[in-house]
Image: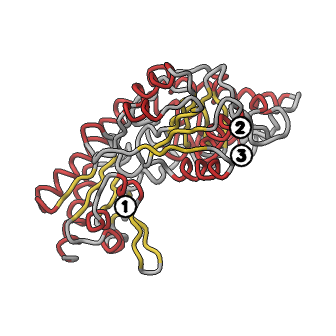
Amino acid sequence: MEKPVYLDYNATTPTDTKVAAEMLPYLQAHFGNPSSSYLIGKQNKEAVERARAQVAELINCQPEEIFFTSCATESNNLAIKGIAWANSDKGRHVITSSIEHPAVTEVCKYLSLQGFDITYLPVNQYGRIDPEDVENAIRKDTILISIMHANNEIGTIQPILEIGEIARKNKIAFHTDASQSVGKIETNVDKLKVDLLTIAGHKLYAPKGIGALYIRKGTRIENLIHGAGQEKGIRPGTENVIHTIGLGKACEVALRDFKQNRHNMQASRDRLLDGLVSKIGSRVYVNGDLANCLPNTLSVAFEKVSAHALASFISSEVLISTGSACHSGETTISSVLQAMGLDFRMAAATVRISTGKHTNIEEIDFAVETIVDAVKKLT
């Protein structure tokens, strides 16, 4: 077993070996510009379109509804700003939640400076939004609802279908940031009833630097970048062929191995929690609701233990992340945990542990022993 054991897959994933192998020929041999009319250009164009179809198949949409971007942050910007600018004549009200990733909240803050009105919906103690709150927040000038599919910190899955039905009924564009959910749980865009959906390549074993945005056909959106006609003019610029091919292959592998990967992630996550509880007992507090959670995600607090101290103490053996930020000796609590109503003490003791599709029993058992030993030494 290699050390340290990596248990921060919600932060990023390693590039799958099958994905890397698919990309390799395009690093040197297949270098043509996809917009070129000669053979090596056409070959790359075909490869990009093949990747588009692979991404589309994973989320059950048409290939022409997939637009490649540089990352999930760009996809979120394109979705939210694009809808806002294209529909500002209809209204300037946007609905989102209080637990979104900064790639959404910072965009909303920017729009508020441009004269848009943003409503941030609350969540319950499990980090879940009440669809009724969405419906009650809708106004005549509401043009967009943006709610993440699953939270990156606690793993809570949102009632996207119910919200989608509300959005459809009121003829409001609906976007979801599915960066954490794609490849882990079902992300069928028709079943979710979304108009826009964000994908992050590096969260599902593709390389960093590639993302995608699903835009339902007929959705009115304005592009943010201006140039030539790539991606139907929605996202112009010479295509990132290598990484696009990687994302396509990653989606193909995710779809093929979906049931197996989901089972392994959840089994390893549950074994980890069971091990911690059996050895520490009542000092372990789980944030969120594991019955309605990403299969790989565990947000847990250890009584009287600083999350930063714990993560630092075990960093040479096990890699996890914390639920707070520490700058110049001051601890800043996650906005997600604040929105859930956690007090400062518990929030500062919270760590996020996220398993991967290849996480094995040996790694989990080692992590349990390491964490338990550290918790005992730190109290």
Q: Is residue 328 left or right of residue 49?
A: left
Relative vertical location of residue 142 with respect to residue 309 in this rendering, above or below:
above
Point out residue 229 in the picture as x, y percentages from the top left corner. Answer: 83, 32
Q: Name the amino acid, label 2.
A: Trp
Report, in whole angstroms, how far the alpha carbon at label 2 lies from the one at label 3. Answer: 37 Å
Circle on res. 85: 2
| SS at circle 1 | loop
Circle on res. 27: 3
Point out residue 101 in the picture as x, y percentages from the top left corner. Answer: 49, 50
Give 28 or 158, whichever is nearer the viewer. Answer: 158
Q: What crowding class fits label 1: few (fewer than 14 Cα within 10 Å), some (14-19), or many (20 or more)?
A: many
Relative vertical location of residue 280 with respect to residue 25 in this rendering, above or below:
below
Residue drawn where x is 30% and y is 48% of the image: 360
Point out residue 121 in the picture as x, y percentages from the top left corner. Answer: 43, 43
Point out residue 235 in the picture as x, y percentages from the top left corner. Answer: 74, 37
Q: Is residue 286 left or right of residue 280?
A: right
Q: Nearer the viewer, mark 1 or mark 3?
A: 1
Identify the residue position indicated by label 1 in the image.
Answer: 323
